[in-house]
Every structure is written in structure tokens, then in C-alpha cells.
Amino acid sequence: MRFKSILLLGVIFGVASAIYFYAHHNWNPLPPNTTIDRILVEKSARKLSIYRAGEKLKTYRVALGRNPTGAKQQEGDQKTPEGVYRIDNRNPHSNFHLALHISYPSAEDTARAAARGFPAGYDIMVHGLPNGRGWL
């Protein structure tokens, strides 16, 4: 009886792992060196879409900060900024896959946070999973 229970758990785990893999595998990756000129993050839908010349190339599901509802107000609030920002740097030594730095805070973000008596925050990046964990 114990063997059958362990075997059943193993089969369930194997099937669940296969379903997860096939549901999350990127079956249609973009060609290497594809250039993009726009990234759109839809926070409520938890989606990130990439564009070139107005054409949507790909959409990905994304996770946001620990407190994703609402716009970023100040440093440490764990929110994702809302607005138009530029990708202004890439960190090739990041612990996360493709860490892209955005131009947050803008002058308006800084003024809004200062009016509340707080710093706006800094060093906001769009990134993938921790390096070495891409199989999750």
C-alpha cells in the first residue's frame, strides 16, 4: 500500500510538472538580435508587450512588485511606476535575466514624492527570473 501511494504521488508530480512546463514554455521565441522600440506594461492584466515600428511582436505574462496596485508614490513602497519611461541602461552583471533600467524617476515623479515629504525612489528595472532559475 505504501509503495502504491508513493508511486501515485510520483505520477501526479510528474504530470503536474509536465503541464507546468508546457504551459510556461516559450514555444515561439523571437529571433536573436531582434530590435524593439517600445515596451508596454499593462499592470492590471499582468502583461508586457514588445513592439517594433508600431507592430506588436510578442506579449509575456509578468509579475510586478510586492505591492502592485496603484502608481509608485515613493521609495520603498514596492509599487511599479506608471508613466512613460525610457530604457536607459542594461546591467549585464545583474543577478536577474535581462535587467533593463528605466528612467524613473522623472522630474514629475520626484516633485510629486517631494511634495509628500519622501524621495521618489530609484534603480527601477524590468527583468526576468533570477539567473539560473529560468527553468521555473
Image (cartoon, grey):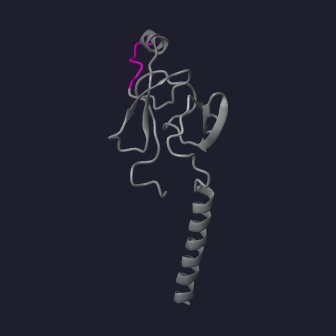
- Which residue is the extreme one toward the bottom? 1
Residue shown at 46% from the left, 15% from the top: 106
Residue 82 at x, y percent in the picture: 55, 24
Left or right, residue 52 beside residue 119: right
Residue 53 at x, y percent in the picture: 63, 28
Q: Main secondary structure of the magenta part?
A: loop
Q: How many labels does the image show?
A: 0
Residue 42 visible (yes or no) = no
Residue 107 visible (yes or no) = yes
Residue shown at 51% from the left, 30% from the top: 80
Q: Any magenta on residue 80?
A: no
Residue span colored magenta? 116-122
Residue shown at 59% from the left, 67% from the top: 18
Q: Quadrant of residue 77?
A: top left
Q: In which quarter of the image is residue 55?
A: top right
Compared to residue 16, the image places residue 63 above or below, namely above
Q: Quadrant of residue 13?
A: bottom right
- Which residue is the extreme one toward the left? 93
Q: Which of 97 and 66 is in front in this view?
A: 97
Q: Which of 67 and 22 is in front in this view?
A: 22
Residue 92 at x, y percent in the picture: 35, 39
Left or right, residue 129 beside residue 42: left
Q: Quadrant of the N terminus?
A: bottom right
Compared to residue 108, the image places residue 78 above or below, namely below
Compared to residue 115, the image places residue 39 above or below, namely below
Q: Any magenta on residue 121?
A: yes
Residue 129 at x, y percent in the picture: 45, 47
Left or right, residue 118 beside residue 33: left
